[in-house]
Structure formats: C-alpha cells, structure tokens
Amino acid sequence: MGVKMQRIAVVTSGGDAPGMNACIRAVYRAGAHAGVEVYGIRRGYTGMIEGDIYKIERRDVGNIIHLGGTMLGTSRSDEFRTPEGRQKAADRLLENRIDGLILIGGDGSFKGGNYLSEETGIPVIAIPGTIDNDIPGTDFSIGFDTAVNIALESIDRIRDTAISHGRLFFVEVMGHTSSFIALEAGIAGGAAHLVLHDGHEEIEELCSHLETLFTRGKHHAIVVIAEGDQPGCSFGIAKKVSNRIQMESRVCVLGHTQRGGSPTSRDRVLAAKLGVCAVNALLNGQGGVMAGEVMREVVFRPISEVVGKQRETDPRMAVLSQILTGY
Ligand code: F6P
C-alpha cells in the first residue's frame, strides 16, 4: 500500500435504489472504525464536478437505514461523460484531499468511475446499486430485491381486481433492457404469461397462449411485461392483444414506484456487507474494482471487466416460468 488513506468519499450515481442509504451508513461506519474521515458527495457526478463535498458526521447516517432513495442525492451527468468533466471532478476531489472513492451505482456510473480511476489514478471501488440487477460479477445488486417485492405486492393487488372483474391485465415492470424484475416478480406473482425485454414482438404467441387459457375456463389473467428500452410499451402490446382476442384489458405501468420505499432486509444486509468490504479494500490499497456478492461471498472484479456487458438472466428461470404459465 502507498500513502495511508486519511479521507475517503462516497457518491451515489444514476438511478437511486433502495438500500443505498444503508450502504452509505456502512461506508461511514467502516471508515470511522478504521479511523478515516468519510466525505459525502452530493448529487452524484454533477455534485462531484461542482465540488459539493462535505464531511459526514456520525449523526448524519443515523435513522437512514430504513429509508429508500439516497441521502446524498443522485444524478445522471452528461458532463461527466467527457474527459474535461471528469478532470473537473478529479480537481475537486484533490482540492478536498480525497484519497479514494466509493461509488454506488449502476453500469452507466461504473463507466464514468472506471474512466476517472484510469485517467487520474484516484482509487475507485464500485458497489452495484441498481434495481435492474444487470451488473455482471454479483448475484444481486442493491435495490433489486426491494423492487421485486414492490412489483410483487402490486401484482397481488391487481389480482384482486382482475379476479373481481374477470379482466385481462398487463403489468409493466422496470429493468431497462434486462428482465430480472419481470422474471422474478412474474414467477412469484403467478403471472399467466411473461413478456421479456426481447419478446415485445411475440404478440401471436401471447394471444394464442391467452386464448388457450380462456378456452380452458380461466376468466382473468395477468401478463407481466419487461419495459425493455421502451417504457410504456405495454399500452401498444395491450391494444394489439385486445383487438386480436376481442377481450377488454387494462394496463398498469408500475414505473418509479418500484424504486422507492423502505429496503428489504436482503438489500440492507447486502448493502452493509458490500459497503464495509469496499472500504476495507480501499484501505488495503485496492482500486479500479467492483465489490460484488457471489454465492454469499464478497468478491472483487476489475470494473473494466463488468462495465458495458449485458448480464443475461438465467435461462433456467425462463424455462421455469414457461412450465408454470403453461397450465
Ligand atoms: O436503471 C434503473 C431504472 O429504474 C430502469 O429500470 C429504468 O428504465 C430507468 O432507471 C428509468 O430512469 P429515469 O429514472 O431516469 O427515468
């Protein structure tokens, strides 16, 4: 290890995810335990560029473990995508004598963090925090479990109305171009059919499956749709299906409800583990790596190996859902 770290900073970037606060708290406490000062960077990379950096005190992280969102605020910064923007951010870190950075975010944020680390030599440890769960090198990202459970609760509620009215419902869940939320919430919620992000065009298959189910006597159905890169796509899909099978339908886009609210215990524990291990890694001289959890063990992978890679869902989950929705 080179110079002993005295000040580390933590930033949350990109879409907020439930459990980010629990992670910030863990980072602060691990830093305090090791005798280093922990600084918070407000509003993600935007705040980093503007030097919106302050020393976190013990009380600042009190009573936040159960809160969704991020106490630091977050942003998606276009300026940080440029070398000039990153240089400005690096200058602000140096002015504040920050020796290392903990970055909590998703793939887009990791790209920026990786560039920052490579271009300026500032050690960065990344922690996966996104409801999409689309980061390779970790079984789960912080926020995913909460988002799935919120989606599940909504599906359960919608089921009441679907049954009462004998209706066809389309429930659209987030996840961008990954289908992790759709798969888990769809299986757990007993959906009649799952439309994954790459299946938006498979209308015929969806219609004939629903027709089979209705012919067999089913009088309502819930179809879970992964938003893919077209949030709101369910309206178009629902219209096509309703016209084709001559059945009235309703659409519910769960949207940002899935990103808010109190994190589940799984997300809080994951946040705690990754936060503490990330600080220890930084203090042990590591940088340019992501802390993830694989089979309950914390593992580190170079950020360069995990960024920009589409993490595919487990094909066995798709098979499972096909079996479960087939009858
Ligand atoms: O990456 C998290 C996520 O919630 C995606 O699932 C979703 O497509 C996107 O962010 C929405 O982004 P925004 O909050 O900027 O509309």
Image (cartoon, rainbow, N blue to C red):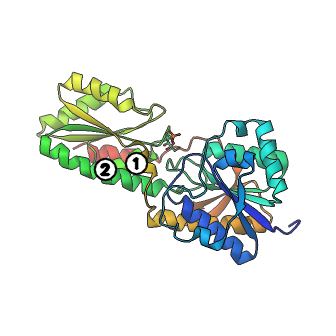
- Nearest to the observer: residue 195 or residue 110: 110
Whether residues under marks 1 and 2 lie with C-beta atoms below 8 angstroms apart, the answer is yes
Which quadrant is home to the N terminus?
bottom right
- x, y (%) of residue 320? 35, 49
Looking at the rendered structure, the secondary structure element under dot 2 is helix
Q: Is residue 34 visible?
A: yes
- x then y, percent, for residue 284: 78, 68
Classify 297 as above or below 227: below
Q: Residue placed at 76% from the left, 44% from the top?
A: 115
CA distance separating discs 1 and 2? 10 Å
Q: What residue is rendered at 76% in x and 39% in y?
A: 85
Number of numbered tags placed on the structure image: 2
In the displayed orientation, state which residue is furthest to the left: 217
Is residue 100 rendered to the left or right of residue 126?
Answer: right
Q: Residues within 10 Å of mark 2 (few under 14, many from 20)?
A: some
State whether residue 188 appears in this view.
no
Which comes sooner in the sequence, label 1 or label 2?
Answer: 2
Which residue corresponds to mark 2?
154
Circle 1 residue: 257
Residue for point 68% across, 66% down? 56
Residue 3 picture quarter: bottom right
User: Is 35 left, or right, of 212 in this rendering?
Assistant: right
Q: Is residue 97 above or below residue 84?
A: below
Q: Is residue 77 left or right of residue 254?
A: right
